[in-house]
Amino acid sequence: MRKENFDRAKQDYEKWGINVDEVFRQLQQVSISIHCWQGDDVSGFEVKKTELSGGIDVTGNYPGKARTPEELRQDLKKALSLIPGKHRVNLHAMYAETKGKVVERDELKPEYFENWVNWAKEHGLGLDFNPTLFSHEKAADGLTLSHPNEEIRQFWIRHCIASRKIGEYFGKKLGTPCLTNIWIPDGYKDIPSDRLTPRQRLKDSLDQIFAEKIDEAYNIDAVESKLFGIGSESYVVGSHEFYLGYALTNKKVYLLDTGHFHPTETISNKISALLLYFDKLALHVSRPVRWDSDHVVIFDEELREIALEIVRNQALERVMIGLDFFDASINRIAAWVIGTRNMIKALLYAMLMPNDYLKQLQESGNFTERLALIEEFKTYPFGAIWDAYCDYMGVPVRETWLEEVKKYEQEVLRKR
């Protein structure tokens, strides 16, 4: 029955010149960068831990949280087995493995991530990286790379320099460039009396961090903006305008996080504009609810619009897609699977639209037919194509993956 549904659905799409077999081949080449921190509630494995900070909050206490690097990798492996395609894993510096030794973040070296590299190599995965500029005593006042205390600022500069070297190591060892992304929490809770000076310090810090050139065959630098956060409601140093200007001027990748803009602002509308000026863009896809709350990604309109902007502008090789959500109120592996499958599902949905014809309708001013077709395609038999793709990629179809997660929960997670 499923095969018959797929054959009929395939015919429906092929009437519009959409080659479903070619879509499958194209989609399986797309790698999503899956964030490790969903698995342990952004805890990390530092010997000397501090409370989660930087305006980041994880709510819930679902049983089975990963407590060790081995448990986290085990959980990631399980999640990846239920997601179609070959993907990447995104790490934060706080996930270093130092064998019980206290190592300050400005002293981190590639050797502390050797287990991650060996694991990624074993499973054919790429790795991405982020310096961790939160959850640390030197970030307790909410300032890091823009800090007025030069000693503290230089500590974080050294940390970011070390992180770039770790990213370079990943790229060399795994044969795929690592995206090393810098995000900082710096800002003020109340209205500042001076917005310029912290931004001057941040610009100087970034200039120092990027002073050494690293081959982009191994490491790609990115900077990430934010509008506001908890404790920085009135002012964030690294704003959209700041990083947009810095990335353009210094030829760095600009990273858009879906939760880092005004609640009524969408990043889907920004992608085409930025593609005019950047060779590459990066995304952190989450789901903000009223604020940057990083809910699990669902198959909603904005996710589909993001995917459409990437696909119809032929930018699959120019936009590096990563995820960034964390929810401790549900099974953490299920969260990974739901969010990542939805991102892939949205890309498939976008590939099955008659994008070229819809562009022609807009250019000719035929807005009636354009709107009619966009709406009709929402109820085309997309589900049958998605089911067939999952089957084609050897992962569970529809909700059957949930049974494997339930079994894993009983056999593994409940025993922690």
Image: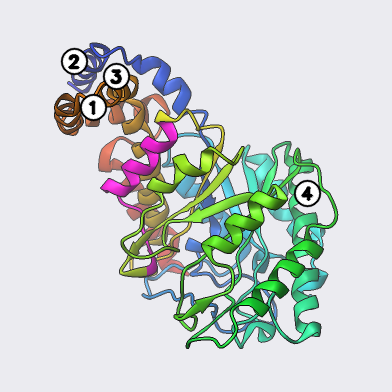
Q: Label 3 belongs to which residue?
A: 357
Q: State the image coordinates of residue 367 (x, y, percent, origin top left).
A: 19, 29
Q: Tell me which label, 1 or 4, sits earlier in the chain.
A: 4
Q: Residue 123's quadrant in the figure?
A: top right
Q: Can you say whether 65 is above or below 357 in the image?
A: below
- Circles 2 and 1: CB distance less than 8 Å? yes
Tally of numbered tags: 4
Q: CA distance from mark 3 to mark 2?
A: 22 Å
Q: Residue at x 59, y 83 (%)?
A: 142
Q: CA distance from mark 2 to mark 4?
A: 48 Å
Q: Tell me which label, 3 or 4, sits earlier in the chain.
A: 4
Q: Label 4 belongs to which residue?
A: 168
200 lies left or right of 24: right
Q: Label 2 belongs to which residue?
A: 8
Q: Tell me which label, 2 or 4, sits earlier in the chain.
A: 2
Q: Amino acid at mark 4?
A: Glu
Q: CA distance from mark 3 to mark 4?
A: 42 Å
Q: State the image coordinates of residue 208 (x, y, percent, origin top left).
A: 81, 64
Q: CA distance from mark 1 to mark 4?
A: 42 Å
Q: Which residues are magenta?
A: 292-311
Residue 361 lies within the magenta run? no
Q: Nearer the viewer, residue 56 or 201?
A: 201
Q: How many residues crowd around disc 1 within 10 Å: few (fewer than 14), some, or many (20 or more)? A: some
Foreground disc of the pair 3, 1: 3
